[in-house]
Image (spheres, rainbow, N blue to C red):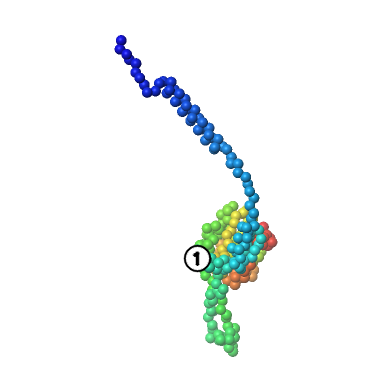
C-alpha cells in the first residue's frame, strides 16, 4: 500500500500549545491595561507657599497708578486711566471708543441785533443775550445701534430677559434723575421687578459712549413710545454735563442696583 503520511514543520501539539500561550498572553495584556486604566495615581498633595507669587504680583503692579484697591483681588480704575495703560503697552487700537471729551461741542445760539455779544449784556431797549448751549446728536439712531438689541426698537424689551423702557423710563426719572445715567454708564447687576415681572440678568457698562451721546440716548428713551406723557412736571432733558458728573462716580454694577433699591424702584 502507498505511504500517505506527510511530514509537517510543527506538530499538532505544538500548534495547540502556541495558540494557548497566545491566548494567555493576550489575557495578561488586557488585564494589565485594565489595571492601569482604573488605578489612581499615588502622588501626594503639597501646599505651596503663595507669598512668592504675591510678591511677584505686587512688583508687577507697583508702577500702576490711578486705581482704587477694593480688597479681595478687586480694584476699580477710571476708564481714561485704563486706556492710558493699554496705550503705554504699545496697543495702537485697543478696539473700543475713547472716553467722552472733556469739553462737549458747543453751538452758539443766534444773537439778535439788540444784543451785545462781546459782553453778554444788552443794549438799550434790547433783551438779554442768549448763551451758547451744548449740542446733542440725534438720540434715536444711537439708541437703535446701542440699546435696541436688548430693549427692542419698540422699547418693549424681551419678557423675562430684558426689561421694557416704554412705560418704565419715566418711573426711573421720577425716582432718581441720576439713576438712568448710572444704569447706562456703569451697567446693572441684580434682580429687579418691572411691571410685576422679575428680571435677573446683567446690563453691561456703556462707559465707552461719549457724554453727549449718552445724554441723547437718555432723552430719546424718556420721550419715545409715549413716555413723554408720563414724565413728571418739570422734566429737564439730560445734558453732556449731567452725564459727565455721574461718570466721575465710577460705580460698580452692584452699587447701581443698590441705588435702584434705595430709590424705591423694586
Please tell me in which quadrant of the rendered image residue 241 appears. Answer: bottom right
- Give the percent coordinates (x, y) of residue 32: 53, 34
Residue appearing at x 57%, y 60% in the figure: 204
The residue that disc 1 covers is: 91
- Give the percent coordinates (x, y) of residue 179: 63, 64
- 245 vs 125, nearest the viewer: 245
Residue appearing at x 61%, y 68% in the figure: 66
Residue 262 drawn above or below residue 10: below
- Give the percent coordinates (x, y) of residue 166: 58, 60
Please tell me in which quadrant of the rendered image residue 75 appears. Answer: bottom right
Q: Is residue 119 in sight in this rendering? A: yes
- 239 vs 128, nearest the viewer: 239
Residue 147 drawn above or below residue 248: above
Residue sticking out furthest to the bottom: 124
- Give the percent coordinates (x, y) of residue 177: 64, 67
- 23 vs 58, nearest the viewer: 23
Which quarter shows the C terminus? bottom right
Q: Is disc 1 placed on a helix, strand or loop?
A: loop
Q: Is residue 237 in sight in this rendering? A: no
Please tell me in which quadrant of the rendered image residue 39 appears. Answer: top right
Which quarter shows the N terminus? top left
Label 1 packing within 10 angstroms: few (<14), some (14-19), many (20+): few
- 108 vs 184, nearest the viewer: 184
Residue sticking out furthest to the left: 2
Residue appearing at x 60%, y 41% in the figure: 42
Residue appearing at x 54%, y 37% in the figure: 36
Amino acid at each position: 500500500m502507498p505511504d500517505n503520511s506527510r511530514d509537517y514543520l510543527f506538530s499538532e501539539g505544538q500548534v495547540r500549545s502556541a495558540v494557548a500561550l497566545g491566548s494567555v498572553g493576550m489575557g495578561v495584556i488586557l488585564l494589565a491595561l485594565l489595571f492601569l486604566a482604573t488605578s489612581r495615581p499615588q502622588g501626594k498633595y503639597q501646599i505651596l507657599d503663595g507669598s512668592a507669587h504675591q510678591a511677584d504680583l505686587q512688583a508687577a503692579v507697583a508702577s500702576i497708578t490711578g486705581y482704587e484697591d477694593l480688597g479681595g483681588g478687586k480694584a476699580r480704575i477710571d476708564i481714561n486711566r485704563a486706556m492710558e495703560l493699554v496705550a503705554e503697552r504699545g496697543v495702537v487700537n485697543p478696539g473700543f471708543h475713547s472716553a467722552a471729551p472733556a469739553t462737549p461741542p458747543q453751538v452758539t445760539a443766534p444773537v439778535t441785533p439788540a444784543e451785545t455779544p462781546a459782553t453778554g449784556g444788552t443794549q438799550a431797549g434790547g433783551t438779554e443775550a442768549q448763551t451758547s448751549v451744548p449740542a446733542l446728536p440725534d438720540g434715536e439712531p444711537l439708541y437703535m445701534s446701542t440699546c435696541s438689541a436688548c430693549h427692542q426698537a419698540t422699547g418693549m424689551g424681551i419678557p423675562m430677559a430684558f426689561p421694557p423702557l416704554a412705560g418704565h423710563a419715566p418711573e426711573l426719572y421720577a425716582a432718581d434723575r441720576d439713576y438712568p445715567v448710572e444704569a447706562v454708564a456703569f451697567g446693572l447687576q441684580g434682580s429687579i421687578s418691572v411691571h410685576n415681572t422679575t428680571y435677573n440678568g446683567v446690563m453691561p457698562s456703556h462707559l465707552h459712549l461719549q457724554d453727549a451721546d449718552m445724554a441723547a440716548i437718555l432723552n430719546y428713551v424718556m420721550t419715545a413710545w409715549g413716555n413723554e406723557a408720563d414724565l413728571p412736571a418739570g422734566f429737564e432733558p439730560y445734558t453732556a454735563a449731567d452725564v459727565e458728573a455721574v461718570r466721575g462716580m465710577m460705580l460698580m454694577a452692584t452699587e447701581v442696583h443698590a441705588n435702584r433699591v434705595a430709590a424705591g424702584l423694586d
